[in-house]
Image: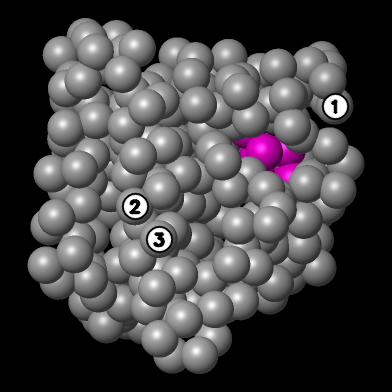
Amino acid sequence: MSAEREMAAGTRFEFGENWSRFLALLDDRRVADAEESLRQMLAMQDLNGLRFLDIGCGSGLFSLAARRLGGAVHSFDFDPQSVACARELKRRYFPEDASWRIEGGSVLDAAYMSQLGRFDVVYSWGVLHHTGAMWLALEQAIARVAPDGGRLFIAIYADQGWKSHAWWFVKLFYNRLPRFLRPLYVFAVSALVRILVILKYTILLRPMTAIAPLLGDRRERGMSAKRDRVDWIGGFPYEFATLETLTGYLEARGFSIVTTRRAGSLGCHEIVARRMPCVE
């Protein structure tokens, strides 16, 4: 089924529409934050001479960051509006650049994925858990990592037990709502969660832990808190896993773990893994 038909049926969130609004907020500081995020997690100062695959490129921000760090970038997304967003960023920063290619495609399309070849860095942040077949998507991403040192950088929603299952229904309901009711739903859910979190940390005598993040829109990695809220509440399909499950899965497939960042609550576990040389 096409992206447009899945969105119309209420089975897939319109990430591209969300990202198109994010472009209005994009500035040089956000781009620099994205570059620094890649440097820190990959433990690399630049990507000169390396091929970078961005699976589910979304706004195109991290494809842009990778290109600015010197990588030859291939970006793709299932959502046509996300592809358009990435192309707009390329037009702004790297017009007519042959080292940055952007197209529509699905990580679940084995034929499409196989013809891409191998990459020194395969990046998919907050994408694979929205495909409806997370483990298959992860296998497809793994297969694109170059042998003998290629790196995989993924972010997958944390398994929070019953909370994750409750959020599955919240997300499903958002996508089944008429479009005009969705902003009100996001506001109501966000307000309820904020109140509960503030009450929790007030009881713990640390109210500013909950209040401080509400005072600004900027997030780590150059992202927007407002756009992330819409992404979080609406993002569907939705799957999740523990950090231990993910790292064990990658190690069993010949990777060594380079960097991990455990999600503190309902966010994403971040993992960078390096494919080990084959020993015959």
Between label 1 and label 3, give the one nearer the viewer: 3
Which secondary structure lies at badge 2? helix
Q: Residue 93 carries which label?
A: 1
In the picture, which quadrant includes the N terminus?
A: top left
Name the residue nearer the viewer: 74 or 183. 183
Residues shaded magenta: 60-66
Which residue is tagged 3? 195
Check disc 1: other Cα within 10 Å, few if <14, some if 14-19, many if 20+. Answer: few
Q: Residue at x 16, y 32 (%)?
A: 173
Q: What residue type is labelled 2?
A: Leu
Mark toward the start of the polypeptide (1 vs 3) = 1
Q: Which mark is residue 192?
A: 2
Between label 1 and label 2, give the one nearer the viewer: 2
Name the residue nearer the viewer: 151 or 66. 66
Q: On the picture, is 164 further left or further right than 259?
A: left
Q: Quadrant of the rendered structure where residue 78 is?
A: top left
Residue 131 in the image: x percent, y percent? Answer: 25, 38
